[in-house]
Amino acid sequence: MIIKSRVFVIIGISLSVTLSGLLVISTLRKASLPNVVLITVDALRPDHLGCYGYARNTSPNIDNLAKQGVCFLNCFSPGSSTTSAMPSFLSGKYLNIYNKEAVFNAGLKNILDQKFTLLSEYLKHRGYYTAAFVTNGHLGPGSGFEQGFSRYHFDFKTTDGKDLTSEVLCFLSGYHGKKPLFIWVHYMDTHIPYKHENACLGDFKNDFLYAKENRKLRVTPIDTFNKSQNAYSSDGNLPRAAHIGGKSSLNYYVMRYDAEIRYLDDQVGRLLEHLRKNSIIIISSDHGESLGEHNRYFAHGENIFDEALRVPLIIKDTGLFRGGFKIDAAVSSVDIVPTILSRVNPPWYFFNKNKFDGIDLKSVILGKNKKRKYIYSFFPWAFSIRDAGRSFKFILNQDGGEELYFLPDENTNLIAAGSREADLIKSELKSNLLDWLKHRPVRCDINVERTPLSDEERDNLKSLGYLQ
């Protein structure tokens, strides 16, 4: 069922509640606080999941969760790379990294300054035991993403979801504390290089998607003048980090991507089996992935088109976030933190919601999000504004270039047509974006540091293509 609008009749009772009374209520509710489980999957496109309409059986466990929760069909990330997206994702505020070295090179320190408060810190202060399990080199200890976590598991040795899930399950089996849990698990399996060659290839090979119109890809060459060129660079070719010897078919690599989703879905299923019933479960991604759109292949962080910005968002919880509903309203990853905090500490959130740029997604389900007109995304050299009510998106590039699209078409720049209507819409969106840019996004990489890497860390980052 897709919800486009709802009409609710609410009988209100006026209560005079003092701040001290709210604090008492907040304290009493601590005993029944739910666990919060945030699952993020690197470079996961929603349109390759069954619950979003994909034809391949890539995600039975995630699909089952979507049937129990709420699936947001149009969620957009603030950025198209891990480092441009996750500061906003974990803070509920529009934060951006402007240091291009920090955007592309893993292993740098303090790319998210500790002056900014993250979800983990809010929940820890609320009484949660906080634990994270990550393997992305950009999220390593010292990056700033670890702040607020009582336990921060980061393993340079493997990015395999099976190993990561086993680590989480080991922690859960050994946790006997009385505090509720906040667990963040970040999987890397759907990020190149694809390593699970035999994962469901038998199911997907030679199906109608594999046999459809195909194209041959050329591997991105090594630049003789810049041999440190990132192995993830696409630039119209297959990134070197994705290349498997002798394989040049686009459909083959899409199949490999889908097989990684299926492998990852099995690990998510293992994790879900061991979660307490009274748990808020959120599944999303840091960003999407280009699979041929705009001449980019198996890459991200090279533009801010929607294939790199659209992410899945599934929330399962008691109350409104259940029942298998699908919401088509445009939302943002920056909404996740406010939604969680409103749920676990409503009195506090009521008085502090203005600290956040995101909104509580309950308002979207209830049809009360009419005040939100725009959603923003950004990268070091480009910014975009999306009209949340109309299907228009404006992009302002650092070099002054301007683009206006009527979504979902992001190939026809309406500015080139020169119509009066396009000019008016561009003027409105550009004016709002420029006003917004006077105060947002806030720079979060204030004191980036480069520290020596151990041999083990360097070898791991090389294997992932983050270092040459």
Image (cartoon, rainbow, N blue to C red):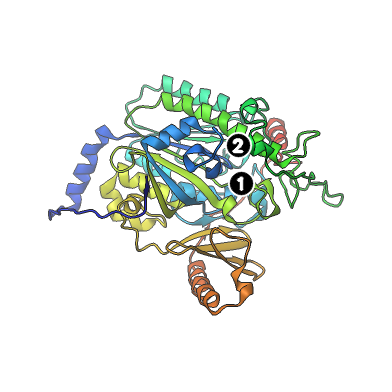
Residue at image x 69%, y 51%? Answer: 296
First in sequence: mark 2 or mark 1? 2
The residue indicated by pointer 2 is 190
Please provide percent x and percent y for residue 222. 83, 46
Front residue of 396 and 173: 396
Q: Would you identify the image quadrant in which residue 38 lies?
A: top left
Q: Counting other residues with Cα less than 10 Å from the Cα at mark 1, is it few (<14), some (14-19), or many (20 or more)? A: many
Q: Is residue 212 above or below residue 382?
A: above
Disc 1: which residue: 289
Give the answer, above or below, for where 444 lies relative to 247: below
Residue at the bottom extreme of this rendering: 420
Q: CA distance from mark 2 to mark 1?
A: 9 Å
The three-letter amino acid code for the residue at tag 2 is Thr
- Mark 2: few/some/many CA within 10 Å (<14, 14-19, 20+): many
Q: Position of residue 156 (x, y in %)?
A: 63, 31
Contact check, label 2 and label 1, Cβ < 8 Å = yes
Looking at the rendering, in which quadrant would you find the N terminus? top left
Specify whether residue 189 is in view.
no
The reply to whether residue 458 is in sight is yes
Q: Position of residue 266 (x, y in %)?
A: 52, 26
- At mark 2, the secondary structure is loop
Question: What secondary structure is found at the residue carrying circle 1?
Answer: loop
Instruction: Point out which mark residue 326 bears.
Output: none
Amino acid type indicated by mark 1:
Glu
- Please name the residue shown 76% across and 34% down the image: 244
Q: Position of residue 245 (x, y in %)?
A: 80, 33
Q: 57 left or right of 371? A: right
Q: Relative to the observer, which residue lies in front, 107 or 84? A: 84
